[in-house]
Image: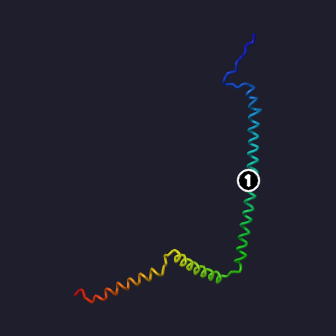
Amino acid sequence: MGRVVSPSPSSPQKSSVIAKIMVVQPSFLMQNVIMHQFLLYSTFLIAILALFFGLYAQGRVAKVEKASKELDWDAVANITGDLATLKKTIQTLNNRLNGMHSPKVAEQELMMQLLQNQGQQKNGKMVGG
């Protein structure tokens, strides 16, 4: 009679190989296709966004150039001086608001120094030789 040969554990059966080819590989290929399409469309979208951001930046630079086209060096120097004056004024105001530049404190210190100097002058005794 015929003998039934059992497959060895190291060699796969035909049915498992066919199932793997028919089921696993198409799903793997489908995932690859979906991933490649996603990458293609996402890079296209990012490139379009970069183009729009570049055009927006170019428009802003053109606007600044147009606004500063008629400026000469005297006007730039005047603007710089005005900005320095304004900065100094703002710093002084902030210091006053924070209490760091209080005129009352300076006046009190001067009065205390004057009182101490007057006290030393009234002594009248000479020290030394």
Residue 91: quadrant of the picture: bottom right
Count of marks, rendered view: 1
52 on left or right of 89: right
Image quadrant assignment for residue 2: top right
Left or right of 31, for residue 111:
left
Vertical placement of residue 12 versus 64, above or below? above
Q: Amino acid at mark 1?
A: Thr
Q: In the image, residue 55 lies at what x, y percent?
A: 74, 65
Would you identify the image quadrant in which residue 114 lies? bottom left
- Viewer-side residue, 32 vs 129: 129
For label 1, the residue is 43
Label 1, secondary structure: give it.
Answer: helix
Task: Bin the neighbour count of mark 1 within 10 Å (Cα to Cα): few under 14, some 14-19, many 20 and up.
Answer: few
- Is residue 97 positioned above or below 10 on the image? below
Q: Quadrant of the C terminus?
A: bottom left
In the rendered image, residue 28, in percent from the top left (x then y), is placed at 73, 38
State the image coordinates of residue 16 (x, y, percent, origin top left). Answer: 73, 27
